[in-house]
Amino acid sequence: MPKIIVEVMPKADLLDPQGKAVANALHRAGNKDIAAVRIGKRIELHFEREIKDADIEKARQLGASFLSNDVIEDVVNVHVEN
Amino acid sequence: MPKIIVEVMPKADLLDPQGKAVANALHRAGNKDIAAVRIGKRIELHFEREIKDADIEKARQLGASFLSNDVIEDVVNVHVEN
């Protein structure tokens, strides 16, 4: 099924407590080379038809307005997977 | 900063109530062409040095064992971003 993937991350200058907790746990488990962890969202929009350029443009708009909170999050990527 | 991105999604045969809620809201807002929505995680592992093949292999293992719950989730992608 064709999908548009919208990837949303917490803004770089904001704390990400969930990511910090995972980073601490990875360190305790010996993974000292992982300097930091940040956790965002991967949102799949499924279509039952072929995806057109207009759909990607619409997904970009929805990503910025509806699927993310632009006070605390950035849309880092919008792409199609078939 | 070099990063390994680990993408985790709820398994296809499981309900995803958060995705379902977003799909319903998108439909109410007129986006009838989006048949379904599923929401997973995008986990960034940050490194302060170059990423080697062994790091990617390790990230794959951590993705399967530590960063996801394999009863309900699948790791759908592991890749490097510089």
Image: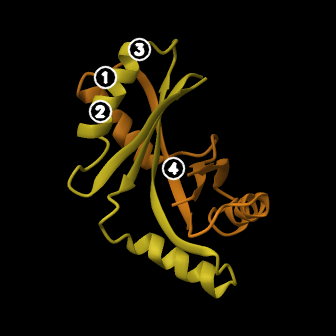
Chain colours: A yellow, B orange
Between A16 and B25, which is closer to the camera in this rendering?
A: A16
Query: Which amino acid, mark 4?
Result: Gly
Q: Secondary structure at mark 2?
A: helix
- What percent of the width, then of the height, locates residue B67? 62, 65
Pinpoint residue A35: horizontal percent, then vertical percent.
55, 74
Q: Residue at x 31, y 27 (%)?
A: B27
Residues behind callouts 2 and 4 on a single chain: no
Q: Which residue is mark 4?
A: B40
The three-letter amino acid code for the residue at tag 2 is: Leu
- In this orientation, does residue B33 appear? no
The quadrant of the rendering that contains the C terminus of chain A is top right
Q: CA distance from mark 1 to mark 3?
A: 15 Å
Quickly name the residue at label 2.
Answer: A62
Cα separation between marks 2 and 4: 17 Å
Q: Is residue B79 above or below residue B23?
A: below
Q: Identify residue for label 3.
A: A53
Image coords of residue A46 (percent x, y): 49, 27
